[in-house]
C-alpha cells in the first residue's frame, strides 16, 4: 500500500543485471520479478507488490541518498556481502543505538546495513 509522502519505490542503476541480482538474492535473500533483459522488480518482504527495481538502463550514481538495510546479525551480513562480490566501503562501526557498515554492490551502488545490536 502506498502512503502519501512515504518512500514507495527505489530504483538502483546497475551495470550488470544478472550479477547484481544474484548479489542481492544471495547476500540478503531478496526476491525479484522478471521484466526482461534490462529490469527486474524487488519484491516486498510480505510478497505484496514491489519496493524497488534494478535497472540496467540507468547507470549507478555517486552521491545519491544512502539506502539502509536492516540486519538481525550484522557480522553475518558483512560476511554475506563479501562472499558474493560486494566491497566494504565503510567497515562496521558503532553509533548511538546500534552498529552499521556500508558496501558497494557489483555495479558500484553504495548501500548501508544497520542493526540495533
Image (cartoon, rainbow, N blue to C red):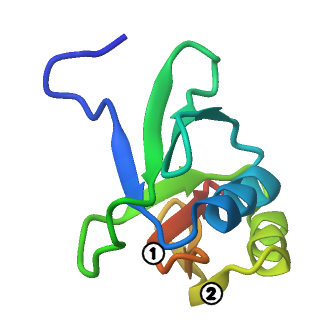
Q: Secondary structure at mark 2?
A: strand
Residue 104 located left or right of residue 25: left
Q: Secondary structure at mark 1?
A: strand
Residue 100 vertical position relative to residue 87 in the rendered view, above or below: above
Q: Earlier in the sequence, mark 1 or mark 2?
A: 2
Residue 106 vertical position relative to residue 68 in the rendered view, above or below: below
Quadrant in the picture for residue 104: bottom right
Quadrant in the picture for residue 33: top right
Residue 23 located left or right of residue 98: right
> Marks 1 and 2, how far apart in space?
9 Å
Residue 48, numbered circle? none
Residue 114 located left or right of residue 79: left
Residue at figure coordinates x 77%, y 60% from the top left? 27
Residue 38 located left or right of residue 61: right
Residue at figure coordinates x 29%, y 75% from the top left? 61
Crowding at dot 2, Cα within 10 Å, few <14 / some 14-19 / many 20+, comes out as some
Q: Which residue is mark 1?
A: 110
- Which quarter of the rendering shows the N terminus? top left
- Which quarter of the rendering shows the C terminus? bottom right
CB atoms of marks 1 and 2 within 8 Å: no
Residue 72 vertical position relative to residue 82 in the rendered view, above or below: above
Q: Which residue is mark 2?
A: 88
Q: How many marks?
A: 2
Point out residue 90 in the picture as x, y percentages from the top left corner.
53, 88
Residue at figure coordinates x 45%, y 73% from the top left? 109
Point out residue 9 in the picture as x, y percentages from the top left corner.
34, 36
Amino acid at each position: 500500500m502506498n502512503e502519501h509522502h512515504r518512500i514507495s519505490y527505489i530504483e538502483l542503476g546497475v551495470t550488470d543485471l544478472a550479477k547484481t541480482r544474484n548479489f542481492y538474492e544471495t547476500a540478503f535473500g531478496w526476491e525479484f520479478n522478471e521484466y526482461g533483459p534490462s529490469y527486474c522488480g524487488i519484491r516486498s518482504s510480505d510478497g505484496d507488490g514491489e519496493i524497488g527495481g534494478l535497472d540496467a538502463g540507468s547507470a549507478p550514481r555517486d552521491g545519491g541518498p544512502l539506502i539502509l538495510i536492516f540486519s538481525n546479525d550484522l557480522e553475518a551480513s558483512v560476511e554475506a556481502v563479501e562472499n558474493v562480490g560486494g566491497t566494504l566501503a565503510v567497515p562496521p562501526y558503532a553509533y548511538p543505538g546500534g552498529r552499521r557498515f556500508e558496501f558497494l554492490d557489483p555495479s558500484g551502488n553504495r548501500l548501508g546495513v544497520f542493526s540495533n545490536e
